[in-house]
Image (cartoon, grey):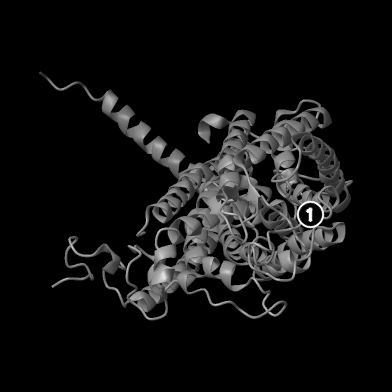
Amino acid sequence: MRTGLIDNWGGNMMDIGPLYPFVGWEVPMVIACLIFWVGWHYLQMRMENRGLESEALMLRQGDNLLKAVQAEHTPERM
Amino acid sequence: MDNGLTALQVLFTETYYWITVVMMFLIHVGFCTYEVGVSRRKNHLTTLMKNAMVIPVVGVTFYLFGWWLYSAMVNGPGITGGVVTSRFAEPWNELMGAHMGGKPHGTDITPADTALWARLNGVFWAAFLLFSWTTASIVSGSIIERVRSGAFWLIAAMLGSVTWIIDAAWGWHPAGWMVQMLGYHDAYASGVVHAIAGGTCLAVLINLGPRIGKFRADGTPRNIPPQNVWLVCIGLFLIYTGFWGFYAACNIPIFDVQPGEGVFWSATNIYLQATTLSAITFNFIMSLCGGIMAGYIMSKADPYWTFSGGLAGVIACSAGNDLYHPIQAMLIAAIIVIIIYRMHYWVERRFKIDDAVGAVAVHGYAGFLGVVAVGVILWGYPSSPDALLGHAQPWARITPWGQLIGAIIMFWVLGFIPGYVLSWILKKCGVLRVPREVELAGLDYLIHATTVREDDEIRAVLLKEARQPAAAE
């Protein structure tokens, strides 16, 4: 069992091409990379939107917003 | 790699670019430091994360399509030809991974391709990626304290992996259509990196709007000073340092520049035109000096604008710093810094644009004017070594109108318009700006609130423990 094209390092160096394992699987790997990238943006934006919504809701309650703005000028509590 | 001279040339070039990448990393460290220093305490952590995450977001997208666009789009496409096939830059090509340079595994590339690109593809890709991070980071600073990070990262992916690299293909690639037809010359990226980033900044700022409290009821601006001027200045020093790597990465360290018979080894600029590292060293330092001195006078010794003036001075001269005389570079830098300083405050007052770090001025206006200045100062120079590249018909020479059109393409066509369209879409989707309450309380409000709550809990536990009688020995 081997995952790459390298048999040994003692042959003709001019015969050695790709060094990484699973040569031939580049297209599926690119598709995986694309899904990872798009998926990350989707998850990040969902997470951020929910976080900001709940934060805004919390700040709208009582005098939370006023306290938060005042706290900006009390560094030991920030 | 079967003869000594070729091996030396390739291995030296590979090592050279690898070192420029390490040096350029300091630009990103500088941008993060600088941005956090400008932001108010309540926004520090979100500001840091917003810029730091440019690294993976633009890194992944530049691997997927950014690098390919650089070689593929040199003709427009449709202006001087179609899309160019550039196998080595396709993300599924074996040369986009660890490769020894010997026999290719696939049939779409030749042994000559692998011999050339196996050792250079990764370091070239990384050098261009570092330019991409810089371009995206420029926008990051101007929109702090009210933009949603997710929205910015989409803008960063567009600018860092699509629009800027298309402008690089047009105006920076030795065979780019702007170089051929307009005689566009922009050796160290005044327009290609800085003007486009400035144009995108301006577009996003228009859709984003100013920070709450920035403008008085009568429309006059309030100054929101940097939270930590020390940190800002250290950040700018780091950017200066990384800028050396940026300049070095715009050169090819060793290349035979003699057309036809004979051999003449030299460093070249990005267009393969012969230059020397000494030339750009003279000009980099003198343009930095001119910019700092003008910034100092204009801002009445304000450290923030003095340091920014130095950066703007270098940016203003970058388009022609391969050919200028050092004193020309100093004077051009000083004059452009005076102009951009005045423009920053005029645009702020006139159009209510809240650019938190002055990025539109320092990068956008300075880059634009720097490209235009080349048209006058280097009028009639060949824009690139067309004979060396084997073209029978000489390409266009540097002219004021060619450079002006080039500057408009960089700032407005590829910078402003795509930036405006994407930020407008994000605004309409309600994901461009944080809610008003969060902006008022600070973007780090939840993180701080959680920290304070946990700190109170720990304090209560410790107090309770302290009140217990000590256990008998």
Rendered-image quadrant of the N terminus of chain B:
bottom left
**Which residue sits furthest left?**
B473
Can residue B3 be seen?
Answer: yes
Local packing at callout 1 (Cα closer than 10 Å; few below 14, some 14-19, many 20+) is: some
The percent position of residue B248, horizontal first and vertical second, equals 57, 45
The residue singled out by tag 1 in the image is: B381
Judge by depth and name the residue closer to the eye, B159 or A27. Answer: A27
Residue at 40% of width from left, 58% of height from top? B119
The percent coordinates of residue B260 (x first, y second) are: 61, 62
Q: Nearer the viewer, residue A5 or B232?
A: A5
Which amino acid, mark 1?
Tyr
- Toward the viewer: A76 or B52? B52
Q: Is residue B199 left or right of residue B228?
A: right
Please state the total of marks drawn on the protein image.
1
The reply, left or right, for residue B18 in relation to residue B244 is: left
For the point 64% across and 70% down, the residue is B74
